[in-house]
Image: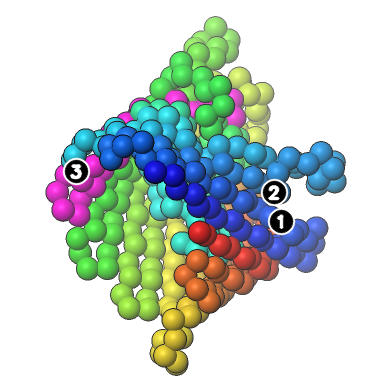
Amino acid sequence: GLSIGGYGEFAGEFRRKGDNIADLERAVLYFGYKFTDRIIFNSEIEFEHAGITEEGKELSGEGGEVAVEFANLSFLLNDRFNISAGLVLIPIGIINEVHEPTTFFGVLRPDVETFIIPTTWRENGIGIFGQLIPGLSYRAYVVAGLDSRGFSAEEGIRGGRSSGTLSRINDPAFVARVEYDRVLGLKVGGSFYIGNSGQNEEVNGKTIGGLTTIYELDAEYQYRGFEARGLFAFVNIRDAALINLNNGFSGADSIGKELYGWYVEGAYNVLPLLFNTTHYLAPFVRFEAYNTQFRVPSGFESNPANNRKTLTFGLSYKPIPNVVIKLDFQDRRNGNDTAENQFNVGLGYVF
């Protein structure tokens, strides 16, 4: 009943200004155990930035991390209704649940699924999943809610994740996702998240509710060598002014009370057009636009630098399906013209 697997990715990031970076972004080990046909354990342990190194922290200002990516028990009852509990991946977006480096284009994950949808996002919780009719699946969980003390102007709700570490569950949240894939080559999905993020914090005698809602739609399409993806996400945060006061933010440091992001991308595997081969070589292009301060509360300001657009284009080469070599260039722009372009090179594997 024991299963072992894993994945990892290396990235090199090169810029005209500032430091060039070479990083073992993550090495992940998967362990699963099938106790019975109906009780299954799944887990991943992640080493980020080559693990915890005090020397690296001193040099770069950013240390590594060893963390549990997810660890949960699934109780399989029937096709329509099953139960999962533990540290679960939040079912939202394209990348968060399926983020192995061989499954997405570009050396780096899309910005929208980093700053608007905070991939990788996992929380302690319990939920149900299944297939309602052929092709129509769902997942729904009650999880620990976000903690608004970690919200910021530049990274939005990303710092509000507990990631399963001593999660404050004064404010639980609900998240659900549905997917449909019965149309040839096309899969469409949508997710909804709602929950308070105040976690009983008080400021000026007022308890912060911080109701956070996320609406997300996505689609993936594949026909022969052509692949395309698209995603749109919108976030609304109530009590943003109170959260600012509690976090000590003023002026343009305000969190956004509304955030949005979207991207589209396309790729084509050109090698079968030229040779009889199982190798994979796909030029790709992705355009994304996002703003972590689309609207701010009255009395605060937006920083134009947080209104961002990124054009990424490059190549993905797979000599075998489990190994990928990536090259890309990112044309990064923002509202005050301070963004810096960069060239990326990456290696990834999954087993």
Q: Residues within 10 Å of mark 3 (few under 14, many from 20)?
A: few
Mark 3 touching mark 1, by CB under 8 A?
no
Q: Is residue 150 above or below residue 170?
A: below
Residue extent of the magenta highlight? 127-151
Q: Judge from the rendering whether residue 316 lies leftward or rightward of residue 1; answer left or right.
A: right
Instruction: Indicate the secondary structure of the residue bearing disc 1.
Output: strand
**Going by the image, does 226 lie left or right of 111?**
left
Which residue corresponds to mark 1?
23
The residue carrying mark 3 is: 79
Contact flag, marks 2 and 1 (Cβ < 8 Å): yes
Q: Nearer the viewer, residue 66 or 137?
A: 66
Give the total number of marks visible in the rendering: 3
- Secondary structure mostly seen in the magenta stretch: strand
Label 3 to label 2, Cα distance in Å? Answer: 39 Å
Contact, mark 3 vs mark 2 (Cβ under 8 Å): no
Residue 158: x, y in percent? Answer: 55, 38
**Judging from the image, what secondary structure is the residue with disc 3 in?**
loop
Quadrant hosting residue 264: bottom left
**Which quadrant, please, contains the N terminus?**
top left
Q: Is 9 within the magenta? A: no
- Where residue 166 sits: x, y (%)? 56, 22
What residue is pinned by disc 2?
Answer: 49
Q: Residue visible at 59% across and 44% down?
A: 46
